[in-house]
Amino acid sequence: MIIAVDFDGVLCEKKFPEIGAPNKEMLKWIYGRRLDGDKVILWTCRAGDQLEAALKWCEMYGLKFDAVNENLPENIEQYGGDTRKVYANMYIDDQNAPDSFMERHNIPYQQGQSYLRTII
């Protein structure tokens, strides 16, 4: 499975342009998914220095990504280039998610706080 995960409001508390407190439950969940062999893409609107700060923050928490704001290298090779749209099976975002989906997939979240958009 390929998981695209947002930074602000998902991996950490939303404090943009600053970096908020870590969402420790989400970090643990992402670690577990990677241990299970899933690929994880950091999918964020941050760019430049703000993206670099986010990546350093993730590194400090031991979080590694298979790609950042781009498709996985094997997908780029297979399709002969990268597209603006990042391909994933699951998109974790603070903008939209049904609570039932979060519960069914054991994704940590706060009731009423959305984290996920997914293709089903």
Image: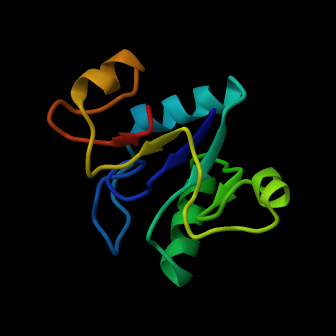
Q: Quadrant of residue 101?
A: top left
The residue lying furthest to the bottom in this view is: 48
Q: Position of residue 58 (x, y in %)?
A: 56, 55
The residue lying furthest to the top in this view is: 104
Q: Position of residue 35 (x, y in %)?
A: 69, 26
Q: Is residue 71 left or right of residue 78?
A: left
The colouring scheme, among rainbow, by chain, secondary structure or one colour, is rainbow
Q: Is residue 1 above or below residue 41?
A: above
Q: Position of residue 8 (x, y in %)?
A: 37, 59
Q: Is residue 18 left or right of residue 54?
A: left
Can you say which quadrant of the picture contains the N terminus? top right
Seen at 14% across and 35% down, the residue is 112
Does any portion of residue 60 appear in the rendered image?
no
Q: Quadrant of residue 82?
A: bottom right
Does any portion of residue 13 appear in the rendered image?
yes
The residue lying furthest to the left in this view is: 112
Q: Is residue 4 above or below residue 67?
A: above
Can you say which quadrant of the picture contains the C terminus? top left
Seen at 34% across and 75% down, the residue is 17
Seen at 40% across and 27% down, the residue is 107
Q: Is residue 76 left or right of residue 25?
A: right
User: Count the marks: how many?
Assistant: 0
Q: Is residue 43 left or right of residue 36?
A: left
Depth check: give the residue in front, 83 or 107. Answer: 83
